[in-house]
Image (cartoon, rainbow, N blue to C red):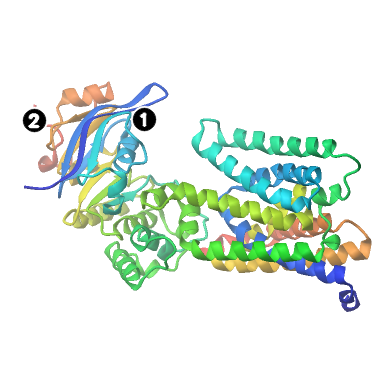
């Protein structure tokens, strides 16, 4: 049986009396690729941040690899939302990727040969090795996103969390980006948050819809009622071909 | 200018200028790339409380500034990270609070407070050798800490949340960085004074950023810029008999503005 990677048990997150996440119950297992869709402000990023231990639940319990989120950070890779960094920051692609090894290297130590080898491999995986000496802001949006994926996987995570990874990427880059995720899928469980329903439906094995409450049936299907409840208005779903439908025929 | 080097006060001034450039060259780069100019200004101004404390206790005011600037760095860091008060509001309040404490201590001190203006506006020509030694010690501490935490500080400045996610104690490192700013303030006070410290913390680093996209090279360059400007400023202030601190800042600001207007626009394309 596949190991349980993430377990949410009746998790609530409230901030200033406002419930961001309500009664979340969720299990993600090894090799799962879960897509989380939902309206903006519905708590998608907060959900990822609780898995990372950046946000503490007000109520309920979260286990990541059977331990607290805080203690499991070494096994989790994270690609934060695009545009959160200063594009003029004086840092090279190489240093950005190496940064992802820091949890393994430890305080007060220089990066080891092993760290450098891992950074080299990660850059190869995302096909960005030739850009290693470029300043991060001089790359295109799609290239930057690849570098951030490399930074997330360089520490050999067993779980990868992606927050709106396709923002700021053009369509061609987006397809390449999804091919890359296909490759990573074999090695780790992935949770991807996105408002791009079409894209999510092509890639993921399981899908959930989040608008403070989580609508999830441990499958790739959502009922029209789920979507209406989550978005509070009828949602047009454009599925990419029959095998990738989000909705059952109805 | 060579004959000036026979005077001890000139040698001290030049040593102080170079030591100040080292501190502000290294720490200024972090201040600029992490965009914490305002909190740095806050730490510098709040340190005036330490000057007042020093006068009140009858000790060298620098020894009042040292603990006071560390305390203001820690309180600003903690209040802005942990309380619900918006960061800039918290900094503004602590900034003014520190200065008020200083003013009250000075007024409680019997008699006239000599050299008070020196601490506000700096006077590199009156730096005693004992202060040069203190600056050397603080520079050493700054270099050792930055050398030890170089990769962590880089990550912290680039992406604080991600650093936390990596399992690195980001908040504690941020507080360490603020303490280093506090130490730099102590180093700089004698040179340009509390009011003008922020210029030395930002201008050399901001200027060096227009020439390189590498953090280490930025540090080297800003140390060099700082040293050239300080010594140039000392010389000009001697020639025209005007205050040295203000002259140093004036020279720096003019060079920065001219370079930004004339050549600075090309800096972005350089990396593309």
Residue A75 position within the rendered picture, expressed as x and y whole percent measured from the top left = 26, 53
Residue B200 position within the rendered picture, expressed as x and y whole percent measured from the top left = 71, 56
Residue B185 in the figure: left or right of residue B161: right
Q: Which residue is mark 2?
A: A249
Quadrant into which the N terminus of chain B falls:
bottom right
Depth order, front residue of B256/B6:
B6
Residue A199 in the figure: left or right of residue A247: right
Report crowding for label 2: few under 14, some 14 to 19, many 20 or more residues within 10 A (C-alpha): few
Badge 2: chain ID: A
Residue A98 position within the rendered picture, expressed as x and y whole percent measured from the top left = 38, 63
Tell me what residue is drawn at x 19 percent, y 41 percent. Answer: A201
Residue B149 in the figure: left or right of residue B198: left
Depth order, front residue of A45/A200:
A45
- Badge 1 element: loop
Q: Which residue is mark 1?
A: A41
* As drawn, A10 above or below A144: above
Residue ranking furthest to the bottom: B2
Report crowding for label 1: few under 14, some 14 to 19, many 20 or more residues within 10 A (C-alpha): few
Residue B84 position within the rendered picture, expressed as x and y whole percent measured from the top left = 51, 30
Residue A218 in the figure: left or right of residue B131: left
Tell me if I can see residue A237 in this picture: no
Residue B221 quadrant? bottom right
Closest to the camera, between mark 2 and mark 1, is 1
């Amino acid at each position: 049986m596949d190991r349980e990677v993430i377990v949410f048990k009746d998790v609530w997150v409230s901030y200033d009396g406002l419930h961001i996440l309500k009664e979340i119950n969720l299990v993600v297992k090894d090799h799962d690729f879960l897509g989380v869709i939902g309206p903006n402000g519905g708590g998608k990023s907060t959900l990822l941040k609780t898995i990372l231990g950046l946000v503490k639940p007000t109520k309920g319990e979260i286990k990541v690899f059977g331990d607290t989120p805080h203690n499991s950070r070494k096994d989790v890779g994270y690609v934060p939302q695009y545009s959160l960094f200063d594009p003029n920051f004086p840092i090279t692609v190489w240093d950005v990727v190496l940064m992802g090894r820091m949890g393994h290297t430890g305080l007060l130590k220089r990066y080891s040969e092993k760290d450098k080898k891992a950074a080299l491999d990660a850059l190869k995986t995302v096909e960005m090795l030739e850009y290693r000496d470029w300043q991060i802001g001089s790359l295109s949006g799609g290239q930057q996103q690849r570098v951030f994926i490399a930074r997330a996987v360089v520490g050999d995570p067993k779980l990868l969390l992606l927050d709106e990874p396709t923002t700021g990427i053009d369509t061609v880059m987006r397809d390449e980006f999804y091919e890359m995720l296909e490759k990573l899928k074999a090695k780790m469980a992935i949770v991807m948050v996105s408002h791009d329903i079409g894209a999510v439906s092509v890639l993921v094995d399981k899908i959930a819809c989040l608008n403070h409450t989580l609508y999830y049936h441990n499958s790739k299907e959502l009922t029209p009622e789920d979507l209406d409840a989550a978005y509070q208005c009828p949602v047009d779903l454009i599925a990419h071909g029959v095998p990738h439908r989000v909705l059952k025929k109805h | 200018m060579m004959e000036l080097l026979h005077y001890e006060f000139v040698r001290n001034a030049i040593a102080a200028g170079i030591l100040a450039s080292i501190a502000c060259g290294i720490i200024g780069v972090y201040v600029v790339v992490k965009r914490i100019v305002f909190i740095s200004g806050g730490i510098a101004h709040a340190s005036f409380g330490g000057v007042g404390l020093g006068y009140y206790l009858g000790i060298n005011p620098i020894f009042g500034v040292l603990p006071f600037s560390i305390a203001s760095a820690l309180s600003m860091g903690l209040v802005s990270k942990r309380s619900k008060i918006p960061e800039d509001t918290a900094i503004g309040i602590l900034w003014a609070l520190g200065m008020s404490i200083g003013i009250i201590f000075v007024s409680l001190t019997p008699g006239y407070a000599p050299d008070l203006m020196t601490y506000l506006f700096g006077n590199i020509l009156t730096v005693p050798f004992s202060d040069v030694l203190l600056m050397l010690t603080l520079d050493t501490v700054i270099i050792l800490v930055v050398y030890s935490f170089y990769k962590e500080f880089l990550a912290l400045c680039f992406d604080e949340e991600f650093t936390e996610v990596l399992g690195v104690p980001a908040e504690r490192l941020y507080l360490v960085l603020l303490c280093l700013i506090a130490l730099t303030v102590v180093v700089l006070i004698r040179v340009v004074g509390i009011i003008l410290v922020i210029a030395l913390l930002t201008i050399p680093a901001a200027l060096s950023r227009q020439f390189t996209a590498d953090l280490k090279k930025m540090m080297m360059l800003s140390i060099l810029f700082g040293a050239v400007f300080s010594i140039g400023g000392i010389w000009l202030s001697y020639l025209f008999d005007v205050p040295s601190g203000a002259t140093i800042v004036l020279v720096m600001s003019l060079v920065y503005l001219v370079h930004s207007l004339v050549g600075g626009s090309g800096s972005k394309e350089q990396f593309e």
